[in-house]
Image (tube, coloured by chain):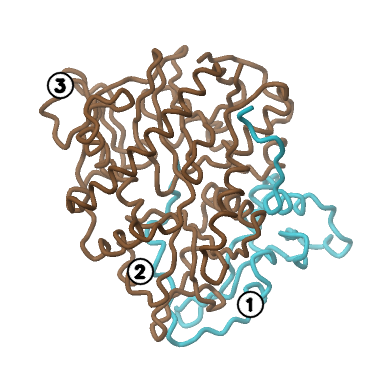
Chain colours: A cyan, B brown
């Protein structure tokens, strides 16, 4: 036998399973997507979602989109939309030390691919 | 090796999406289960043996490059060389790599080694495995990627200072994120505490001289799906060797040697006429039919196939400034106009399984389809 006998996934499928949950009553009156990204994180509203017929995986992807805002032309990062990354990074209230700079990696902004 | 056309599963898109595989289709299908490749057990054994052999040869080639100080031939800048040597001499943690093989006429030939940022791991380790459960679970598959990943993360765990392992890749690329999240999944199952931070968000703490995540937690161990040659050319690149806490980068910086196509002429020099290798050189004076490859090309970009001084196929791209190598032409096997490449995985120093990419041309690129396989 060359193949794995049994495969269990604890992170990815949990994320996707969350995308398949039925909407709650109070979700009816908006066009935002609600999902959770692991079994412990609180439900999180995912903003900036447009259109219909979008696949689950893309919803999952949106869960990992960062959120932040521009202030005086400077972008302030305040965490990710997903509750599954870390609770602290999702509350949108990070205060950064003055000596920390960001954005110094990622200049080559395209997939590494195969 | 046979190519077998079949009917895809009903609602196969839904089946693979439930696994977290969201990039199965772009403008053309990427995951293609209307066909599979059937390999004999002897073919699989030969690929497994070849993988182990080439892996050993590759490590010897890295040692040779370091001993002979050939970094300039690889276009590796001086400032990162001490870190490369340190990561090699101290055996910093590494987890995986993927050889691309041409398998034809009872021969196996190394085309290249994706040693730093190989992708298609999720397709190979998970998606095709679940496909086989649906298609014919009595059949075998050359694929123990998943259990080997978990097993090797367990081995690495004691060597990770402070035990937390960050995972990073670019934002806005679902393929990279899926690969990273899959590796993180396996690390979690191995008992490793993990955190995800996109590489665009990594911070540099000027006072403490160390990299931090979004919560300003120090990054001590980090798996990155982002090429070394991009990292060292980014603004923060110069900070990598001076980080005071000396973080472990996985894959380690010595993989810059192995992932560079300059390793192919080095291998040929060290193992001339080895049956698993194709003749490769830094110039084209000794070959009439050859493939011209940039040192750092990805996804089949900027590749040129020359036959008797005539270019028969060429791809566009942004690579080539760094120079080229020239590799003897050994065309992929043809199955009704389709050309498969075997991607053979090394996980934790061991052959772990294969994934097959198929294209309509002789050059495999980012639109080439991933097709499953089984062992007859």
Residue at image location 30% in from the left, 21% down from the top: B330
Neighbour tally class for label 3: few under 14, some 14-19, many 20 plus, Cα within 10 Å: few
Identify the subunit bearing mark 2: B
Identify the subunit bearing mark 3: B
> Can you tell which of label 2 and label 3 is closer to the viewer?
2
Q: Indicate which disc residue B309 carries.
A: 3
On the rendered image, what quadrant is the C terminus of chain B found in?
top right
Q: Indicate which disc residue B85 carries.
A: none
Residue B375 position in % (x across, y down): 60, 20
Q: Nearer the viewer, residue B349 or B255?
A: B349
Q: Quadrant of residue B88?
A: bottom left
* Helix, strand or loop status at disc 2: helix
Neighbour tally class for label 1: few under 14, some 14-19, many 20 plus, Cα within 10 Å: some
Q: Quadrant of residue B190?
A: bottom right
Tell me if I can see residue B227 in this picture: yes
Residue A43 position in % (x across, y down): 77, 65
Q: Nearer the viewer, residue B48 or B184?
A: B48
Label 2 – label 3 distance at C-alpha: 43 Å
Tell me if label 2 and label 1 are in contact, CB under 8 Å. no
Residue A45 position in % (x across, y down): 73, 65
Q: Which residue is mark 1?
A: A92
Q: Count the numbered circles shown.
A: 3
Residue at image location 43% in from the left, 52% down from the top: A110
* Helix, strand or loop status at disc 3: loop
Residue at image location 71% in from the left, 25% down from the top: B9
Residue at image location 62% in from the left, 51% down from the top: B186
Do pointers 2 and 1 mark residues of a single chain? no
Q: Indicate which disc residue B240 carries.
A: 2
Label 3 – label 1 distance at C-alpha: 60 Å
């Amino acid at each position: 036998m060359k193949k794995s006998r049994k495969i269990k996934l604890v992170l990815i499928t949990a994320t996707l399973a969350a995308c398949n949950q039925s909407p709650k009553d109070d979700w009816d009156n908006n066009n935002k997507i609600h999902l959770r990204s692991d079994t412990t994180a609180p439900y999180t509203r995912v903003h900036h979602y447009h259109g219909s017929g979008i696949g689950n995986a893309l919803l999952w992807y949106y869960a990992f989109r960062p959120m932040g805002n521009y202030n005086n032309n400077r972008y302030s990062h305040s965490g990710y939309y997903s509750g599954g990354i870390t609770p602290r990074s999702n509350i949108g209230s990070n205060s950064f030390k003055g000596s920390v700079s960001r954005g110094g990696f990622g200049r080559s902004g395209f997939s590494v691919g195969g | 090796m046979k190519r077998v056309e079949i009917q895809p599963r009903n609602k196969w898109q839904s089946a693979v999406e439930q696994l977290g595989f969201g990039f199965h289709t772009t403008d053309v299908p990427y995951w293609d289960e209307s066909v599979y490749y059937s390999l004999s057990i002897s073919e699989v054994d030969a690929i497994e043996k070849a993988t182990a052999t080439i892996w050993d040869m590759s490590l010897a080639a890295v040692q040779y490059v370091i001993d002979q100080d050939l970094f300039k031939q690889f276009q590796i800048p001086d400032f990162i060389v001490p870190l490369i040597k340190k990561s090699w001499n101290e055996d910093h943690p590494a987890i995986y790599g993927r050889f691309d093989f041409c398998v034809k006429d009872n021969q196996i030939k190394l085309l290249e080694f994706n040693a730093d940022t190989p992708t298609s791991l999720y397709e190979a380790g998970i998606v095709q495995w679940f496909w086989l459960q649906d298609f014919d679970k009595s059949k075998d598959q050359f694929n123990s990627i998943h259990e080997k990943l978990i097993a090797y993360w367990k081995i690495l765990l004691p060597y990770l200072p402070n035990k937390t392992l960050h995972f990073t890749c670019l934002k806005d690329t679902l393929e990279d994120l899926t690969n990273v999240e899959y590796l993180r999944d396996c690390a979690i199952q191995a008992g490793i505490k993990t955190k995800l931070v996109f590489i665009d968000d990594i911070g540099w703490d000027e006072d403490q001289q160390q990299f931090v995540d979004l919560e300003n937690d120090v990054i001590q161990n980090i798996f990155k799906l982002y090429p070394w040659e991009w990292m060292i050319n980014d603004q923060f690149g110069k900070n990598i060797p001076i980080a005071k806490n000396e973080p472990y980068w996985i894959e380690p910086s010595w993989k810059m040697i192995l992932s560079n196509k300059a390793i192919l002429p080095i291998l040929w020099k060290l193992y001339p006429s080895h049956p698993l290798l194709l003749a490769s050189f830094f110039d084209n004076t000794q070959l009439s039919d050859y493939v011209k490859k940039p040192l750092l090309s990805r996804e089949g970009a900027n590749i040129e196939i020359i036959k008797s001084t005539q270019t028969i196929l060429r791809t566009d791209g942004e690579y080539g400034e760094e120079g080229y190598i020239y590799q003897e032409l050994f065309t992929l096997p043809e199955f009704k106009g389709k050309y498969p490449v075997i991607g053979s995985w090394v996980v934790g120093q061991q052959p772990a399984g294969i994934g097959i990419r198929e294209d309509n041309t002789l050059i495999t690129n980012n639109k080439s389809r991933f097709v499953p396989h089984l062992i007859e």
